[in-house]
C-alpha cells in the first residue's frame, strides 16, 4: 500500500452521493461476464439496462447498487470509444460505479478545488464530468465524477472550492450521461498528466497494472 493509500485508511464519513442514504442501503452489483442476468439483457439499450438496475436494487431492498473496480465488462463493446479497429479493446473498469436515479445529489469526497470539467458527449463516454484536485499532507491527487447533469457544469469555474460533503453536482439521465443507466462513476487519480475534464475510466489488459497503480480503489476512501 502506498503512503497516499495509507492516509485514506484514516479518513472517515466520506460519501459521494446523497448523504441521507446509509451504507446499509447499498448492495453490490456484478457487471462482469460471470453475471448470468446479463446474458438475457440487451445491454446496448440504456433503457433496458436502467430497468434492470432498478429491479435489482428493489429486489435487494436497497437504495444504491455499487461496484466495478478492476472489473472486466462487455458493456463497452457497443461504443467505438472503447472498441475500434485501430486500438486494443478497453474493457476493464478502473473506477467505482454507484447506481441510483438521475437527479441524485453528488457530493465532494474531500475538500478540493475544481481542476477541470467537460462535457464528454460521445456514446458510452462520461457525459458531463468534473475533476477535483485535493491535497493530503504532501500528496496532491484528484477525484473524477462522471455521468453528471449538464446543469452541474453550466456555472462551474476552474478553481471553485468545494468542502467535503458539499453538493458538487447532480446525476444526469440517459440523454446526457453517455447513454447509460443513471449512475456516478467515481475515480481516484494520482497523476493526471495533461488531461483536462477527462481521464480514462476503462483500460485494456496491457495497461491494467499502470492504471491500478495510478487509480487506487475508490473504496479505500468510501469504505462501503
Image (cartoon, grey):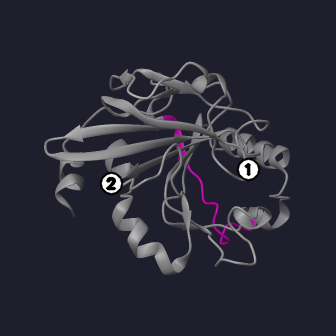
Mark drawn on residue 122: 1
Q: Is residue 116 magenta?
A: no
Q: Quadrant of the N terminus?
A: bottom left
The region drawn magenta spans 25-36
Q: Quadrant of residue 128?
A: top right
Label 2 belongs to which residue?
Answer: 190
155 to 109, vertically: above or below: above
Residue 77 spot, x, y in % from top left: 75, 67
Answer left or right for 39 relative to 97: right
Q: Residue furthest left?
A: 137
Q: Residue at x 43, y 29 (%)?
A: 158
Q: Residue furthest front?
A: 194
Answer left or right for 75 relative to 61: right
Q: Quadrant of residue 63?
A: top right
Q: Residues within 10 Å of mark 2 (few under 14, many from 20)?
A: some
Q: Is residue 27 magenta?
A: yes
Q: Residue at x 86, y 59 (%)?
A: 42
- Front residue (pair 220, 80): 80
Q: Residue at x 21, y 53 (%)?
A: 4
- Front residue (pair 77, 61): 77
In what element is the residue under mark 1? Answer: loop
The answer to whether residue 224 shows anywhere in this view is: no
Q: Quadrant of the C terminus?
A: top left
Q: Quadrant of residue 166?
A: top left
Mark-to-mark CA distance, 2 and 1: 25 Å
Answer left or right for 166 relative to 50: left
Q: Residues within 10 Å of mark 1 (few under 14, many from 20)?
A: some
Answer left or right for 165 relative to 208: left
In what element is the residue under mark 2? Answer: loop
- Front residue (pair 161, 51): 161
Amino acid at each position: 500500500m502506498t503512503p497516499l493509500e495509507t492516509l485514506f485508511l484514516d479518513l472517515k464519513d466520506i460519501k459521494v452521493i446523497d448523504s441521507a442514504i446509509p451504507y446499509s442501503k447499498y448492495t453490490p452489483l456484478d457487471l462482469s461476464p460471470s453475471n448470468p442476468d446479463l446474458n438475457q439483457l440487451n445491454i446496448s439499450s440504456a433503457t433496458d439496462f436502467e430497468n434492470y438496475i432498478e429491479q435489482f436494487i428493489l429486489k435487494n431492498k436497497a437504495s444504491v447498487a455499487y461496484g466495478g473496480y478492476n472489473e472486466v465488462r462487455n458493456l463497452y463493446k457497443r461504443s467505438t470509444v472503447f472498441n475500434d479497429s485501430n486500438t486494443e479493446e478497453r474493457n476493464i473498469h478502473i473506477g467505482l460505479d454507484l447506481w441510483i436515479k438521475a437527479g441524485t445529489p453528488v457530493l465532494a469526497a474531500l475538500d478540493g478545488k475544481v481542476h477541470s470539467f467537460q462535457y464528454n458527449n460521445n456514446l458510452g463516454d462520461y457525459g458531463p464530468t468534473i475533476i477535483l484536485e485535493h491535497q493530503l499532507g504532501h500528496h496532491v491527487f484528484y477525484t473524477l465524477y462522471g455521468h453528471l447533469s449538464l446543469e452541474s457544469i453550466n456555472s462551474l469555474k476552474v478553481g471553485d472550492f468545494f468542502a467535503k460533503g458539499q453538493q458538487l453536482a447532480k446525476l444526469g439521465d440517459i440523454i446526457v450521461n453517455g447513454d447509460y443507466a443513471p449512475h456516478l462513476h467515481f475515480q481516484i487519480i494520482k497523476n493526471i498528466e495533461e488531461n483536462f475534464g477527462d481521464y480514462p475510466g476503462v483500460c485494456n489488459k496491457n495497461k491494467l497494472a499502470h492504471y491500478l497503480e495510478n487509480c487506487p480503489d475508490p473504496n479505500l476512501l468510501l469504505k462501503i
